[in-house]
Image (cartoon, grey):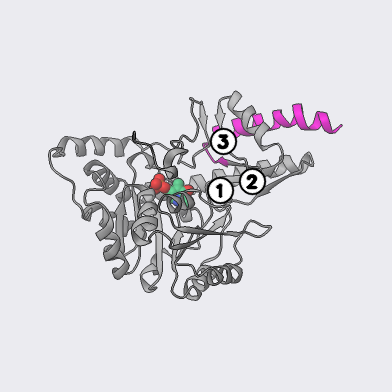
Amino acid sequence: MPYTLSEKVRELEPYDPISGTYEIRLDANESFFNLPDDVKEEIKEIIDKTDFNRYPDPTAKKLTKAFADYYDLDPDNITVTNGSDEMLYLLASAMLSKGSRVVVVDPDFSMYGFYSFLSENDVFTYKKNDELNIDVDDLLSFAKENDADMIIFSNPCNPTGQGITADQARKLVTGAGNSLVVLDEAYMDFWNEPLLKEAHKYDNLIVLKTASKAVGAAGIRLGFAVANTTITKALRAIKSPYNVNMLSQEIGTCIYSHKDMLKVRRDEIVNNTGYLYEQLSKLTDNYHLPMKVYEPHANFVFLETEKAGDIFEFMLENSVAIRWFKKAGALRITSGSVQENNQFLLLFEKYIMKNILKTNR
Ligand SMILES: *Cc1c(COP(=O)(O)O)cnc(C)c1O
């Protein structure tokens, strides 16, 4: 008998968010800023001094300290991974087991369900309300009914940009009893309802952060988990020892030490996102379009429309990549530079003129 792939992986396709090259990328929630020149100069010096023949520090001590300094945390509560994605996989596979019961919410980041699928967890999906938000009491009863081992969701949410307040999140964590709550605060830099600083006070909470969004360093793959020291010890023990390479550790340390630069850029991203939202709302109001634009709490705008697929294709034809959520009938537009956002808005209006208004009249 020849070797055959197991049923579980046979039908899987490699992750490829969008193939092709596009002039404007508003599809992956990255920062539109590349690193500033002075930081790039520092990185050149870092590369000069690197001992490439040595293994990296398995505890990522310097980087942990720089991250802790930036967010005002205690390094003892932090675990560093090769992007948050590595931690998500570890949570599903090593913190949980086959048959563990995981509650996810919908819509939300698809990776939670994916890693649970690979790890053969039993997944229970809580449907969000009409405003695409979580009703905490509802979610708590749902988790109890299904005897959840873990509840995981992003706050604010990717892709909706909606979120629950810190007070609601506290209520969830304290009410969750013996379920582990994983709060993915990948986008919380753009909003201000975090549990990050108090994560260590709970016995059942892990807060996730990443360098891929507000910090503008998706390319070097850095993720951070913040929790009490008992959980942290377990997380540090289950990760592969040399998970974060030497250059990412050094470059990450350098980037997080540029606190003012990071904050100025974050504020600019927030402003640009607000502009994109206002302009989109104006267009949909002025033209009475049957679309719903959600007020963003992250660096992207979520838009429900029956024309999502059409608009997505139209944008691609004009070399602008955005994200289409087929099942939800929605688009997610990452906020870019002012110029990129204006180019998107111009095309959006052009699409409306040509396709929607014409057929409505
Ligand atoms: C982008 C994103 C992450 C970050 O993943 P990395 O592996 O650190 O790049 C984590 N969670 C959510 C919800 C995201 O959208």
Which residue carries the number 1 mark? 159
Which of label 3 and label 2 is nearer to you?
Answer: 2
Image side of residue 312 versus residue 194, left or right: right
How much space separates mark 2 and mark 1, taking CA atoms? 10 Å
- 151 lies above or below 320: below
Residue found farthest to the front: 1
Secondary structure state at the residue bearing disc 2: loop
Query: Measuring 43% from the left and 54% from the top, which residue is drawn there?
Result: 120
What amino acid is found at the position of numbered circle 1 in the picture? Pro
Secondary structure state at the residue bearing disc 3: loop
Return the residue nearer the eye: 155 or 233: 233
How much space separates mark 1 and mark 3, taking CA atoms? 12 Å
Which of label 2 and label 1 is nearer to you?
Answer: 2
CB atoms of marks 2 and 1 within 8 Å: yes
Nearer-N-terminus badge (3/2) = 3
Q: For residue 311, what is the image quadrant?
A: top right
Label 3 within 8 A of ligand 1 by Cβ: no
In the image, residue 339 lies at what x, y percent? 55, 32
Q: Is residue 266 visible?
A: no
- Which disc number belongs to residue 322? 3
Q: Is residue 248 visible?
A: yes
